[in-house]
Image (spheres, helix red, strand yellow):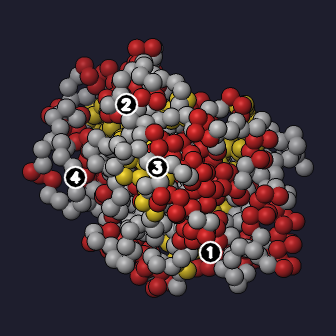
């Protein structure tokens, strides 16, 4: 047989029917559901009187609307209705749901892997673009819209077009103070937010092999910000060790059998990708986005770009508009950007390792006087407990951070946590679009360590100066 | 699903690249549990000068006179002309719901973000990809001629100008078939229920842990 890429293996294993040359009906193994993109899908099922195809494939949680302070009640009636609609749908159909107050509740992309509900070789879908996160486990994980959520609920399949394949190779040791987040931003900065459109990306190379599962999830999480349909990483010992003993992972003989199969979920030697891009880890710096798209990113020691140096008129206007929205001046040093708020959280950077790395910077330090709010929002109740067991909560609170309950929180501000107009935030989330964290709010994407460093300094600063 | 066959409509130019789904329909409107009623909030933050709230009456809100869809000559536009990577960002189907509810039936751009592109087909909105140079010509034509209209023919896969210039575009066969006929994809797929069941039997033998009790 011809050598195959990981994507081709995953694709082939899930084809139920070939529809046309490049479109197939794919079987879906795991369906993750949250409150925002599901109500209309359940309603559609009821109107058409269709049952669920395989209820055991579904895991649901509430995350986008959940308050991060007191979780007993949601003040906003519209948010409350959306959450209770999910609760009701799950109760009606017998779906396994981690509700508010359940220690397993959290951001859908954090809890899937944490529970072992995301396994290698699976197709994973969710009505959420950051489903690409789960590709870190050599799963084919894709974000879908609400019509497709309904389609998967009713048929356990998805009509899908085969993507082109891209291998993104990162080689070498990451410098101190440089994290998976910086790798992700660096790749997006080079490729652009449409650079991965039409592709399924496999991340490979020695840098990737050295990353923990948390780091791999951060990277795959942001594959969507490069426009890719999916991001993925081959199975290795790190994958297997992470999964062993997780509640939904197979046990005993089935575990052994599964591991044998999972070990084959790598791209074969000699497999051909439609495109290969290579990065040198040693050249990656701690990064900060300055604009309103994740591709608008530079090193912390660089300056805000000058639109006059951009020849392409559409791009130049884009830079000008971004500078205006962000209230920044061309050529100013990134380290002169003074911030108001700090947010450590989101499906990109709210796992235990993220919290540890931020706490390491904050230990024995305090947020600067100009910081009006600094939030830590763990990705799940279990991450929160684990962090508390290590005493990380104490470090954060001593440094002046608020220690919150799990959810999406200020990543997109559907709950009470958001920016006010004009406020500037150092955020570990994944999108810096206009108004993303609140109307008129200004978002700078950074790693958890860089967010912690910015909190301490009150402006962006190279975290390496604090680590030595 | 709504059919799309041919459309002759007024074109509105949105001269921006990377228009994201947060811009198309801001997050506060995602709290709705309905599929309809998003039209008044399409591009809410760009279209109005105040901050929009769900379930509010938009008729008395201060509008941004500079925003393209507020400009008199583009009232009633059914075709939105825009730049690269339209619809990037989240998977929210509220974005095509809002476009459709507003009255936009087709989009023309050099490229679209994957998930958004896909979501459009499920809602009777046709995203048309044309080469960047052609899109640039169309932008110039729209600016020059008030009342500029285009005809989009899905069957023939063409965009035709009023002076008869035709630009062809590519579209996936299966999506075209569903959109031309307004077909319910779930119903279509369920005709293959036996195939799905047969696949499950095979798969349960090969990867039995996926069908275990622990889930
Ligand atoms: S944390 Fe942010 S990006 Fe992730 S699922 Fe929640 S809202 Fe979406």
Q: Rounded to the nearest whole Å, what is the CA distance between mark 2 and mark 3?
A: 31 Å
Secondary structure under tag 1 reads: helix
Q: Give percent across and percent down for residue A308.
A: 40, 14
Disc 2 marks which residue? A322
Q: Which residue is at a point 57% across and 47% down the rendered structure image?
A: A361
Q: Chain of mark 2?
A: A
Numbered disc 4: what chain?
A: B
Q: CA distance from mark 1 to mark 3?
A: 45 Å
The CA distance from mark 4 to mark 1 is 38 Å
Label 1: how many Cα within 10 Å (few below 14, some 14–19, many 20+) = many
Quadrant in which residue B126 is drawn: top left
Closer-to-camera residue (A155/A379): A379
Disc on the earlier residue, 2 or 3: 2
How far across and down, in percent of the image, does residue A392 sit?
57, 61
- The secondary structure type at the circle numbered 4 is loop
Asked if labels 2 and 4 share a chain, the reply is: no
Query: Considering only vertical position in the picture, is A211 above or below B1?
Result: above
| Residue denoted by label 4 | B52
Instruction: Return the residue at label 1.
Output: A57
The label shown at residue A98 is none
Q: Secondary structure at mark 3?
A: loop
Residue topped by disc 3? A366
Give the alpha-carbon distance from disc 2 to disc 4, as whole Å: 22 Å
Report if the CB atoms under discs 2 and 1 are less than 8 Å apart.
Answer: no
Q: CA distance from mark 3 to mark 4?
A: 37 Å
For discs 2 and 1, the disc positioned in front in the rendered view: 2
Depth check, mark 2 against mark 3: the one in front is 3
A260 vs A385, left or right, is: right
Q: As rendered, which of B195 and A87 lies closer to the eye? A: A87
Rendered-image quadrant of the C terminus of chain A:
top right
């Amino acid at each position: 047989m011809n050598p195959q890429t990981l994507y081709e293996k995953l694709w082939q294993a899930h084809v139920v029917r070939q529809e046309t040359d490049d479109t197939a009906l794919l079987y879906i193994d795991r369906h993750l559901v949250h409150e925002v993109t599901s109500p209309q899908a359940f309603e559609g099922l009821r109107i058409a009187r269709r049952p669920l195809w395989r209820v055991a494939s579904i895991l649901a949680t509430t995350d986008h609307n959940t308050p991060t302070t007191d979780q007993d009640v949601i003040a906003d009636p519209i948010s409350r209705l959306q959450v209770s609609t999910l609760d009701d749908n799950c109760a009606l159909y017998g779906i396994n749901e981690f509700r508010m107050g359940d220690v397993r509740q959290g951001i859908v992309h954090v809890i899937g892997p944490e529970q072992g509900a995301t396994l290698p070789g699976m197709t994973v879908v969710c009505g959420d673009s950051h489903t690409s996160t789960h590709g870190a486990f050599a799963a084919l994980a894709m974000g879908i819209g609400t019509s497709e959520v309904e389609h998967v609920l009713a048929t356990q399949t998805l009509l899908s077009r085969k993507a082109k394949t891209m291998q993104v190779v990162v080689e070498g040791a990451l410098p101190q103070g440089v994290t998976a987040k910086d790798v992700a931003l660096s790749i997006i900065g080079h490729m652009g937010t449409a650079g991965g459109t039409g592709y399924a990306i496999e991340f490979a190379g020695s840098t990737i092999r050295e990353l923990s599962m948390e780091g791999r999830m951060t990277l795959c999480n942001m594959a969507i910000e490069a426009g890719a349909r999916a991001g993925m990483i081959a199975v290795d010992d790190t994958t297997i060790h992470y999964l062993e003993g997780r509640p939904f992972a197979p046990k005993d003989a089935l575990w052994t059998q599964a591991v044998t199969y999972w070990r084959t979920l790598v791209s074969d030697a000699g497999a051909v990708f439609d495109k290969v891009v290579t990065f040198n880890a040693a050249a990656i710096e701690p990064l900060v986005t300055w604009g309103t798209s994740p591709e608008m990113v530079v090193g912390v020691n660089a300056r805000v770009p000058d639109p006059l140096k951009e020849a392409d008129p559409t791009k130049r206007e884009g830079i000008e508009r971004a500078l205006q929205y962000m209230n920044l001046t061309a050529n100013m040093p990134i380290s002169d950007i003074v911030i108001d708020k700090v947010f450590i959280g989101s499906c990109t950077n709210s796992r235990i390792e993220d919290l540890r790395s931020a706490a390491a910077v904050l230990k024995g330090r305090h947020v600067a006087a100009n910081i009006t709010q600094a939030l830590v929002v763990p990705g799940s109740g279990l991450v929160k407990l684990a962090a508390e067991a290590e005493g990380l909560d104490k470090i954060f609170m001593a440094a002046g951070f608020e220690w919150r309950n799990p959810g999406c929180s200020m990543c997109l501000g559907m709950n009470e946590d958001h920016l006010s107009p004009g406020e500037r935030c150092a955020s570990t989330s994944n999108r810096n679009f206009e108004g993303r964290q609140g109307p008129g709010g200004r978002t700078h994407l950074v790693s958890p360590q860089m967010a912690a460093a910015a909190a301490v300094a009150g402006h962006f600063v190279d975290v390496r100066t604090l680590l030595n | 699903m709504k059919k799309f066959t041919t459309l002759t409509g007024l074109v509105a130019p949105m001269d921006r690249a990377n228009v994201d789904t947060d811009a198309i329909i801001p997050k506060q409107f995602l709290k709705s549990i309905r599929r309809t009623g998003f039209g008044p909030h399409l591009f809410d933050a760009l279209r109005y000068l105040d901050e929009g709230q769900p379930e509010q009456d938009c008729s008395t809100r201060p509008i941004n006179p500079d925003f393209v869809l507020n400009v008199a000559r583009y009232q009633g536009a059914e075709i939105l002309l825009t730049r690269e990577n339209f619809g990037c960002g989240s998977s929210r189907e509220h974005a095509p719901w809002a476009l459709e509810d507003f009255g936009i039936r087709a989009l023309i751009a050099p490229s679209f973000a994957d998930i958004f592109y896909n979501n459009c087909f499920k809602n009777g909105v046709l995203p048309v990809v044309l080469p960047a140079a052609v899109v640039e010509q169309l932008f110039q034509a729209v600016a020059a001629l008030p009342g500029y209209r285009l005809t989009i023919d899905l069957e023939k896969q063409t965009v035709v100008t009023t002076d008869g210039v035709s630009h062809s575009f590519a579209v996936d066969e299966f999506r075209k078939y569903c959109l031309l006929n307004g077909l319910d994809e779930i119903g279509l797929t369920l005709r293959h229920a036996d195939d799905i069941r047969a696949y499950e039997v095979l798969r349960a033998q090969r990867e039995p842990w996926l069908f275990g009790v622990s889930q």
